[in-house]
Image (cartoon, rainbow, N blue to C red):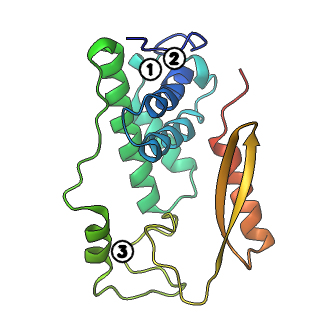
Amino acid sequence: MNDQPPSAPQRGTGLAFVQHWDWVAEKSLMPRNTAMSVRAAVSQILKIEEGWEGIDVRRLDADSLIARFSNLSTLSPGSLATYESRFRSGLSSYLSYLDNPTSYQPKARKQSLPREASLQKSSKGRRKREGGAPVGTAAGSPPSQTPIQSGVRLVVYPFPVRPDVFAELKLPADLTAEEAERLSGFLRSVALASV
């Protein structure tokens, strides 16, 4: 089993930890969106550490790193909890990979209900707070999980990231300059440094 691409950084480093999730998605070891969500949390939390690319993940003080990330972050408490959960499960899974790459199976989240049933159940009887987000949902939740306030029209913009790689951005038709600036800052925070 070819468990690491030839151009991969040294195993056990911060950069290898982040890139591991690209490999997991490429090999279809878990759904791509799940792997990319873990990757985003891992990269954002690691990036608060100077020289994060070369740190030894096995010696990482996850509690301290997560606490520092929480102190520096402007994310909502719900989003912070999601990032922490993804980081911790991602770290556990990656350490398992480092210990035994030949029998590695990433740990996937358990889903008790099919996604559609879960969404229907969670949206029943919820009141809306000001701004349109249902009570009990994080402000930064993806549009697919947060009901959209009536009257808001989303436009899908294809974005060429690099040759043969396109992303789709779903944005409000009336996106403000302030919202665009926040989005730009978020995208800079999830980008990997050039190698």
Farthest residue, direction right = 177
Residue 190 occupies which quadrant of the picture? top right
133 to 69, vertically: above or below: below
Badge 2 vs badge 1, beta-carbon distance below 8 Å:
yes
Kindly identify the amino acid type of the residue bearing the numbered disc 2: Thr
Pointer 2 or 1: first along the chain: 2
Find disc 2 in the rendering and name its residue: 13
Badge 3 vs badge 1, beta-carbon distance below 8 Å:
no
Find disc 1 in the rendering and name its residue: 57
Residue 160, percent from left and from top: 75, 47
Q: Residues within 10 Å of mark 1 (few under 14, many from 20)?
A: many
Kindly identify the amino acid type of the residue bearing the numbered disc 3: Gly
| Residue found at x 30% / y 12% | 102
Find disc 3 in the rendering and name its residue: 136
| Residue found at x 57% / y 14% | 8
Residue 127, percent from left and from top: 36, 88
* 111 left or right, relative to 49: left
Kindly identify the amino acid type of the residue bearing the numbered disc 1: Val
* 91 left or right, relative to 125: right
Farthest residue, direction front = 164
Q: CA distance from mark 2 to mark 3?
A: 37 Å
